[in-house]
Amino acid sequence: MVKCFRKSFSLSDLWVTSHERLSDFYLTSWQRGDSAVPMLVLRMLLAVITMSIFVWSIATSPTPYWLIYLTNWGLLLVTLLTLSATLVSLLAVCQRIPDGGPLPWYVSMYWLFYNTTITVAIIITGLYWILLYNPEQEEEDDGFWLDLATHGFNSCVAFVEIVMSRTPLRLLHIYQPLGVGLWYAAFSGIYYAAGGTDGMGNPFIYEILDWRQAGRASIIVAVSAASLIVVYALLWGVTLCRDRVSTSLIRTTSLELPFVPPDRHSPSGMV
């Protein structure tokens, strides 16, 4: 569930180690009851597809340069998200997730990937189709379908995971995707300063992030960071709407009510 406002918070709220209901990480918002199977089936399907795209991308460009592109960082994050999500759902079905206490490490790992990936995936999609896509080059390289998979399906996975799951999104966690974005910007600058090139020998990874023109590159980084913050806030709003709608219309809220002892004055409470 989304936390709109709290008078106070602990340091644990800044990280991914505590949450009120563990079931929020393996149940879908659009189900009654407490079966973890529906979300497991969906997550297994997404994991198979993302793994296939991951292998396809590496097989198409089996060089060390694969590691320098933000697109491939995003693809790796999406793959890790679907695999960690599947692990959480599988352990929930097998009843291996303990109740009470701090979140298990694999749930915290999934939550961290969720916080970072859903925002970064959408930003990557937007940056590519707005700033980098070149139809003429796609016709020459015949790489349109791979680009569509790596710059389109990543956002589809993010959207499905947001809408279908109950995974919480906290405003306090905005530093996690922002940290990934800023780390990539720093990496691209360090890579340039160290004399790194792209696969064709150019002294940059992306032409729009050419640090020989530091002013323009800095503007691109600043605009991208601001866009990431806006996207995260919008996703927080989507999560809020998802929880309110599904709780009022779909979810079996009686499963979440605390146990109340019977009234001693009622017939059922008499000894």
Image (cartoon, helix red, strand yellow):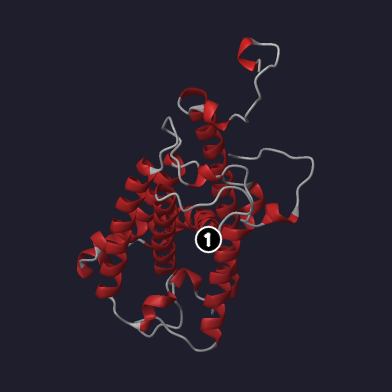
**The C terminus lies in which quarter of the figure?**
top right
| Res. 148 in view | no
| Res. 50 in view | yes
Placement of 79 over or under 7, stated as above or below = below
Residue positioned 66% across, 15% down in the render: 270
The reply, left or right, for residue 81 in relation to residue 53 is right
Q: Amino acid at mark 1?
A: Met
From this viewpoint, which residue is outermost toward the right?
A: 7
In the rendered image, residue 103, in percent from the top left (x then y), is placed at 59, 54
Residue positioned 54% across, 48% down in the render: 231
Name the foreground residue: 89 vs 227: 89
Location of residue 27 by image quarter: top left
Residue positioned 21% across, 69% down in the render: 140
Circle 1 sits on which residue? 109
In the rendered image, residue 186, in percent from the top left (x then y), is placed at 58, 74
Residue positioned 53% across, 30% down in the render: 255
Q: Secondary structure at mark 1?
A: helix
Placement of 34 over or under 142, stated as above or below = above
How many labels were placed on the picture? 1
**The N terminus lies in which quarter of the figure?**
top right
How many residues crowd around disc 1 within 10 Å: few (fewer than 14), some, or many (20 or more)? some
Name the foreground residue: 174 vs 243: 243
The reply, left or right, for residue 181 in relation to residue 6 is left
In the rendered image, residue 61, in percent from the top left (x then y), is placed at 28, 76
Placement of 77 over or under 23, stated as above or below = below
The reply, left or right, for residue 185 in relation to residue 35 is right
In the rendered image, residue 41, in percent from the top left (x then y), is placed at 32, 46
